[in-house]
Image: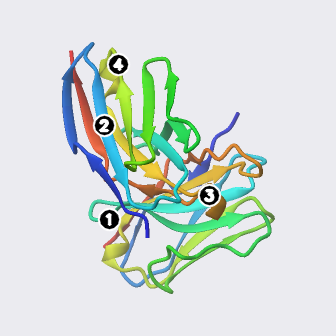
Amino acid sequence: GENVEQHPSTLSVQEGDSAVIKCTYSDSASNYFPWYKQELGKGPQLIIDIRSNVGEKKDQRIAVTLNKTAKHFSLHITETQPEDSAVYFCAVANMEYGNKLVFGAGTILRVKS
Amino acid sequence: GAGVSQSPSNKVTEKGKDVELRCDPISGHTALYWYRQSLGQGLEFLIYFQGNSAPDKSGLPSDRFSAERTGGSVSTLTIQRTQQEDSAVYLCASSSQRGGPYEQYFGPGTRLTVT
């Protein structure tokens, strides 16, 4: 089955700096790649996603890049703010087979002010 | 509009008892998913419902786990004869799916503690 690896497990950045989180996956048939943000005591919140027919997608300070050949994708957060501090999860799915998400282990992001 | 809701938010039960967890998806969403989040296993898929199709139960860890979805809306996840390793946060997500979009929206979860 699909295997997703996420790095780093923790990331500390200074407010205003950029943060990058990377994920690799194993199944070349996977075609949907969302990123979720989870705050303490809450469910995961979808922040951005990308499909396999696109190489990059941007939404304000957040961007995701996808390299299908290398089977990895990354989350980029620019101009980080203290409220960006949370746990971030990447996930992988196949839209033709129920879109069941396989998650990475998560990255704890701390933005220091 | 209203998001995915789950109840109860917390449940403490004794080992061996049965528990029922409830999920109310976003109105109009045809797909519903259950996931489990635990320290040891991370976030893992349990079961998936899509419209009137037979559910995909491929993620259920044992036959003590079952789920149903009535009227294409509310879903109940049942765990029989609970064990300590069942302690986790149980998350429900829904999606509109048909022809896209495929985004899954999660509820706040039910924290289950088995003593």
Chain to which the residue tagged by mark 4 belongs: A
Residue B56 lies left or right of residue A85; in this view the side is right
Chain to which the residue tagged by mark 3 belongs: B
Look at discs 3 and 1 and give the one toward the viewer: 1
For the residues labelled 4 and 2, the Cα–Cα distance comes to 12 Å
**Amino acid marked by disc 2:** Ile
Residue B38 lies left or right of residue B11; in this view the side is left
**Amino acid marked by disc 1:** Gln
- Residue identified by numbered label 3: B23
Image coordinates for residue B112, horizontal then vertical, percent: 41, 64
Q: Earlier in the sequence, mark 3 or mark 1?
A: 3
Q: Earlier in the sequence, mark 4 or mark 2?
A: 2
- Residue identified by numbered label 1: B41
Query: Mark 1: which secondary structure?
Result: loop
- Residue identified by numbered label 2: A21
For the residues labelled 1 and 4, the Cα–Cα distance comes to 30 Å
Look at discs 3 and 4 and give the one toward the viewer: 4
Determine crowd level at label 4: few under 14, some 14-19, many 20+ residues with C-alpha closer than 10 A: some
